[in-house]
Image (cartoon, rainbow, N blue to C red):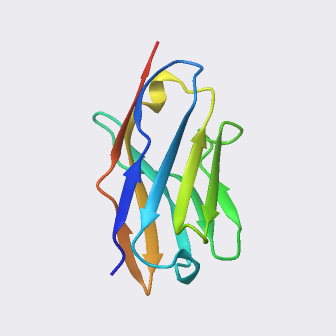
Amino acid sequence: QVHLVESGGGLVQAGGSLRLACSASIRTFTIHTMGWYRQGPGKQRELIAVTTSGRSTNYADSAKGRFTISRDNGKNTVSLQMNNLKPEDTAVYFCYARHAVVNTWGQGTQVTVSS
């Protein structure tokens, strides 16, 4: 079973940037799909970005042009670079992995964007 630990959340002003990192307990080159979800106050959890072992990526419309997902199999991490943050990006961000038909999420890291 994969264990995921997120880091890098915090408080930032609108227009600022944050980089989230997710460390996996197993070699990430064995994990087909990794990504990031978020859950804002009073909202459902939503997919923000994913990357596959084939290096393809997919983004939610809200993330396109502002967020970049990257995977470093040497460090067993997946990262999310978030630029031009907006107050509506405020949420708990969860790392995600799909490995051997099992879906796993980390415990989440809080991102708060002030206006």
Report which quarter residue 90 is drawn in: top left
Q: Is residue 10 above or below residue 2?
A: above
Residue 81 shown left or right of residue 94 in the figure: right
Report which quarter residue 41 is drawn in: top left
In depth, the one of 41 and 31 nearer the eye is 31
Picture coordinates of residue 55, whole percent (x, y): 70, 69
Picture coordinates of residue 5, whole percent (x, y): 36, 59
**Extreme residue in the top direction:** 115
Number of numbered discs visible in the structure rendering: 0
Residue at the spot 64% in from the left edge and 57% down from the top edge: 70
Q: Is residue 22 above or below residue 109?
A: below
Residue at the spot 49% in from the left edge and 45% down from the top edge: 20
State the quadrant of the N terminus.
bottom left
Picture coordinates of residue 81, whole percent (x, y): 60, 43
**Extreme residue in the bottom direction:** 100
Residue at the spot 42% in from the left edge and 57% down from the top edge: 95
Residue 81 shown left or right of residue 5 in the figure: right
In depth, the one of 64 and 53 nearer the eye is 53
**Extreme residue in the front direction:** 75
Picture coordinates of residue 31, whole percent (x, y): 52, 78
Residue at the spot 63% in from the left edge and 43% down from the top edge: 61
